[in-house]
Image: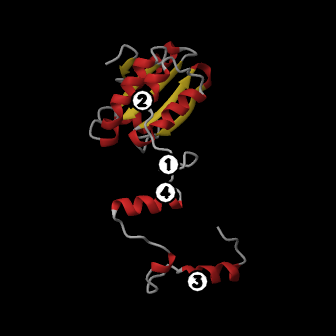
Amino acid sequence: MKANMKNIKSQEDLDEQLLMAGDNLTVVQFFSPRCPACKALHPKVRQYAGIHPELQFLLINCDEHREIGQSHNIHVLPMFRFYRGAEGRICSFSCTIATIHKFKAALKRHGVQTANPAAEKSLAKFDPERVDSSTDVPNKIQTENLTEEKGLAKIGPESIDSSTDVPNKTQAENLTEEKGLGKI
């Protein structure tokens, strides 16, 4: 483990580490060793710790310290929280290996400069052609391409079984007009 990474053992330990960090940015990661997303992400977090020795990385194993996760309302893993001195928690988000760009963006947003652009570039491997970076949700063309690549069936409003309570495209348009609702 990197020198600027520490496993937290209790709420008191977390409080003490945050106090000692002062106004320096501290990254707290809530994880579980049983979580596949956590396991996949851990090497990248270690790399970021190596690239940014000025940051403190605090790791909380929610299997061993369930009470800490519960007291911080952690419901999704892995979860990251950034803290800075008197400001306290300044950001909170979940991310996976597929969305590691969120982690990089959060660091940048909170003033962390890239010391080694080449090293950091290799960490944020996400394909902007596949994902709309403003939403992390594939757009229609990207979804169609992924559907074809993966051999998945296309599902659209016309393909919904009318025996269900879900309206098809025509029914949805009629309901929209009847209720005076705007189209999305």
Kind of residue indicated by mark 4: Gln
Of label 3 and label 1, which has the lower sequence position?
1
Mark-to-mark CA distance, 2 and 4: 23 Å
> Do tag 1 and tag 4 residues touch (Cβ < 8 Å)?
yes
From what the image shows, is residue 171 above or below residue 120?
Answer: below
Q: Position of residue 79 (x, y in %)?
A: 44, 37
What residue appears at the point 34 percent right and 31 percent down from the top-left corner?
A: 42
Of label 1 and label 4, which has the lower sequence position?
1
What residue appears at the point 46 percent right and 25 percent down from the top-left corner?
A: 120
Q: Residue furthest right?
A: 180
Residue at label 1?
129
Q: Nearer the viewer, residue 15 or 78?
A: 78
What residue appears at the point 55 percent right and 45 percent down from the top-left corner?
A: 133
Look at the numbered disc 3 and give the secondary structure of its residue: helix
Disc 4: CA contacts within 10 A as few (<14), some (14-19) or many (>=20): some
Residue at label 4?
142
Q: Nearer the viewer, residue 31 or 118?
A: 118
Q: Position of residue 157 (x, y in %)?
A: 51, 76
From what the image shows, is residue 7 above or below residue 93?
Answer: above
Mark-to-mark CA distance, 1 and 2: 17 Å
Of label 2 and label 3, which has the lower sequence position?
2
Look at the numbered disc 4 and give the secondary structure of its residue: helix
Residue at label 2?
122
Residue at label 3?
170
Kind of residue indicated by mark 2: Ser
